[in-house]
């Protein structure tokens, strides 16, 4: 923070710090473990502060979440590369719902939903979190995840279908 | 049978992201496509489930403290030459928030830990508020000037009005950061005593006023239209209630 002058520091506090909740929530869902998410969210905030002189106004939340997302993926690459390598393998993840015992055991709806969301690949998880929990627009999601707006729409469609089927399967206790 | 619209327009329609023309186009399609109608219902169910489950996880007070500590590795305890009024208000704000938040128990947290963490948080905020460059404000009785200044600084629209005719003269405004959240503060004067009105956006629904007092401060807290307000002073609670009604009639 010492790199910034008093004016930039005040701007950082007013524009970026209000989005600490959003930063943690995204990291928590991407990394799935709170302790990891806290470390990464903190690192992302520090990076945001270092890069802040390069922020020239606009959507501060999207700007911060982009950094959080990149930090999360770098962390996953380094610490849990397997999670990323299976990211695009939808068949594998549909298979994963064939063993939904953990989902079925979680009698509580909230837990069931959380587990279902966690079985999705990170790319689908993040888009659902950004849209449904963070209330981001397609344009914001496109900025944060660096994908075209059209792809946001089709990814959301697939992510929602997967979540829906994960939930349906878990409530029936078995995959079709 | 799947419908070609299901992957593209349907999602955009559901999320309110289509242009007027595309919306009309999709609604025409919807009239005779059972598949899309069913999908829409499923999407609604899914969204309801996600909303009802309340799985959004905000940062804990301890994470906010960690971040603050990392951002401010050395916190000089010396006060800078700031206008006295703002200093006084900063101290009052910190004490007030301490009082207010200690009186609250978060629904998802173990009471004692949560309160202890928040107390630490507010004391940190107090120390930070004494640092040079942290605190800034504008002294003006002109609501437009104060609003212009706050809008430029803040990330949310602040309703500003002078109620001098009703005995609450606008003295100025400032911004502060409490628990990592940007908070707008309006300063009014009533019979020579300052009243601070804190406001910040909230996700919660409207709520009736809650009042209390701590350490000779009176406070009233309420929510209206996704904004939380909290007025505090060392004056009479009757004055606070009157100011609350004035603000609510315009906010």
Image (tube, grey):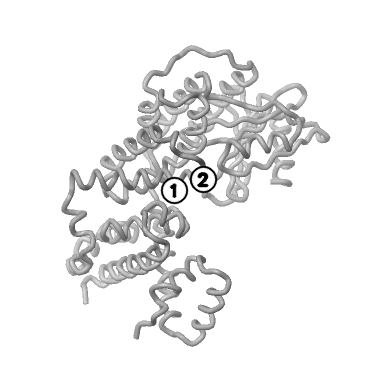
Q: CA distance from mark 2 to mark 1?
A: 9 Å
Q: Position of residue B196 (x, y in %)?
A: 65, 30
Q: Residue at x 43, y 70 (%)?
A: B11
Host chain of mark 2: A
Q: From the viewer's perspective, is B232 left or right of B35?
A: right
The residue pinned by badge 2 equals A58
State yes or no: discs 2 and 1 in contact (Cβ < 8 Å).
yes
Host chain of mark 1: A
Q: Residues within 10 Å of mark 1 (few under 14, many from 20)?
A: many
Q: In this rendering, which labeled residue sits more in front, label 2 or label 1?
A: 2
Tell if the residue under mark 2 belongs to the same chain as the one under mark 1: yes
Tell me if residue A18 comes above or below residue B140 in the rendering: below
Q: Secondary structure at mark 2?
A: loop
The residue pinned by badge 1 equals A62
Tell me if residue B60 comes above or below residue A110 in the rendering: above
Tell me if residue A60 comes above or below residue A163 in the rendering: above
Which quadrant would residue A107 be assigned to in this image?
Answer: bottom left
Q: Can you name the residue that lies furthest to the right here?
A: B165
User: Can residue B211 be spotted in the picture?
Assistant: no
Which quadrant would residue B190 be assigned to in this image?
Answer: top right
């Amino acid at each position: 923070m010492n790199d910034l002058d008093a004016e930039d520091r005040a701007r950082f506090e007013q524009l970026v710090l209000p989005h600490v909740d959003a930063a943690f929530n995204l990291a928590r869902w991407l990394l799935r473990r709170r302790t990891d998410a806290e470390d990464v969210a903190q690192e992302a905030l520090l990076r945001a502060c270092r890069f802040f002189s390069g922020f020239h106004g606009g959507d501060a939340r999207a700007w911060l979440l982009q950094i959080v997302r990149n930090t999360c993926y770098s962390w996953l690459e380094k610490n849990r590369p397997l999670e990323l390598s299976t990211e695009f393998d939808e068949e594998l993840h549909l298979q994963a719902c064939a063993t939904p015992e953990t989902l079925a055991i979680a009698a509580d709806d909230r837990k069931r939903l959380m587990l279902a969301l966690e079985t999705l690949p990170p790319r689908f998880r993040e888009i659902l979190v950004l849209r449904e929990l963070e209330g981001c627009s397609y344009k914001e999601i496109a900025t944060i995840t660096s994908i075209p707006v059209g792809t946001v729409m089709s990814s959301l469609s697939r992510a929602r279908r997967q979540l829906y089927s994960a939930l349906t399967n878990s409530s029936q206790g078995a995959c079709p | 049978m799947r419908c070609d619209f299901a992957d593209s327009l349907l999602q955009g329609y559901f999320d309110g992201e289509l242009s007027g023309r595309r919306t009309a186009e999709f609604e025409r399609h919807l009239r005779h496509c059972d598949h899309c109608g069913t999908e829409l219902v499923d999407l609604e169910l899914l969204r309801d489930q996600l909303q009802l489950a309340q799985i959004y996880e905000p940062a804990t007070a301890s994470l906010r403290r960690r971040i603050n500590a990392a951002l401010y590795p050395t916190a000089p305890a010396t006060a800078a030459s700031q206008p006295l009024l703002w200093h006084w208000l900063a101290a009052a704000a910190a004490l007030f928030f301490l009082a207010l938040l200690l009186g609250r128990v978060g629904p998802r947290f173990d009471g004692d830990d949560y309160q202890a963490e928040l107390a630490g948080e507010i004391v940190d905020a107090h120390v930070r508020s004494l640092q040079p460059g942290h605190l800034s404000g504008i002294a003006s009785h002109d609501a437009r000037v104060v609003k212009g200044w706050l809008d430029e600084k803040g990330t949310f629209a602040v309703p500003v009005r002078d109620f001098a005719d009703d005995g609450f003269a606008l003295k100025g405004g400032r911004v502060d950061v409490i628990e990592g959240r940007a908070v707008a503060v309006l300063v009014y004067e009533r019979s020579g005593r300052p009243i601070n009105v804190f406001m910040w956006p909230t996700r919660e629904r409207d709520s009736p006023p809650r009042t209390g007092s701590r350490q000779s401060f009176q406070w009233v807290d309420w929510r209206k239209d996704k904004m939380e307000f909290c007025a505090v002073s060392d004056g009479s609670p009757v004055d606070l209630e009157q100011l609350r009604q004035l603000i609510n009639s315009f906010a």
